[in-house]
Amino acid sequence: MSAIQTLKSWIGALTDLGLMLLALGIVCALLVGGQNIPFFGNVAGNIMTFVKELGANGLVGLIALGFILWLFSNRSMS
């Protein structure tokens, strides 16, 4: 059971790191005007495309957005 807890903590830590890098990429994109930033790429453009695709899918997009928000809000570092 210890291996599962260790794996969960590693996955949680990697997810947190990914979210921090995403936030850093968004801030960097806002500071330089949304250009293609080395290492981060076009973060703002990719997020806008993702939201546009969810919006184009109507109810299915809304359900997917709700599921994504639920995944991030109900996470706990066990």
Image: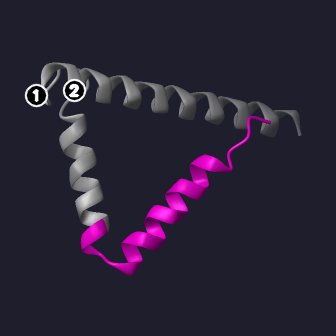
Q: Position of residue 55 (x, y in %)?
A: 29, 68
- At x 74%, y 35%, the residue is 77
Mark 1, other Cα within 10 Å: few <14 / some 14–19 / many ≥20? some
Disc 2 element: helix
Q: Position of residue 45 (x, y in %)?
A: 18, 43
Distance from Cα at disc 1 to Cα at disc 2: 6 Å
- At x 40%, y 77%, the residue is 60
Task: Between residue 40 and residue 59, name the one nearer to us.
Answer: 59
Q: Which amino acid type corresponds to the residue marked 1 in the rendered image?
A: Gln
Q: Residue furthest right?
A: 1
- Disc number placed over residue 29 in the picture, else none: 2
Task: Between residue 60 and residue 9, name the one nearer to us.
Answer: 60
Q: Which amino acid type corresponds to the residue marked 2 in the rendered image?
A: Ala
Q: Position of residue 53 (x, y in %)?
A: 25, 64
Residue 33 lies in what quarter of the image? Answer: top left
Q: Is residue 31 above or below residue 34?
A: above
Check contact, mark 1 vs mark 2: CB within 8 A. yes
Disc 1 element: loop
Mark 2, other Cα within 10 Å: few <14 / some 14–19 / many ≥20? many
The tally of labels here is 2
- At x 58%, y 47%, the residue is 72
Mark 1 sits on what residue? 35
Q: Is residue 23 left or right of residue 54?
A: right
Q: Position of residue 76 (x, y in %)?
A: 73, 41
Q: Residue furthest bottom?
A: 59
Which quarter shows the C terminus?
Answer: top right
Is 62 magenta? The answer is: yes
Which quarter shows the N terminus?
Answer: top right
Q: What kind of secondary structure does the magenta stretch mostly adopt?
A: helix
Q: Earlier in the sequence, mark 1 or mark 2?
A: 2
The stretch of residues the image draws in magenta is 55-78
Q: Is residue 62 above or below residue 47?
A: below
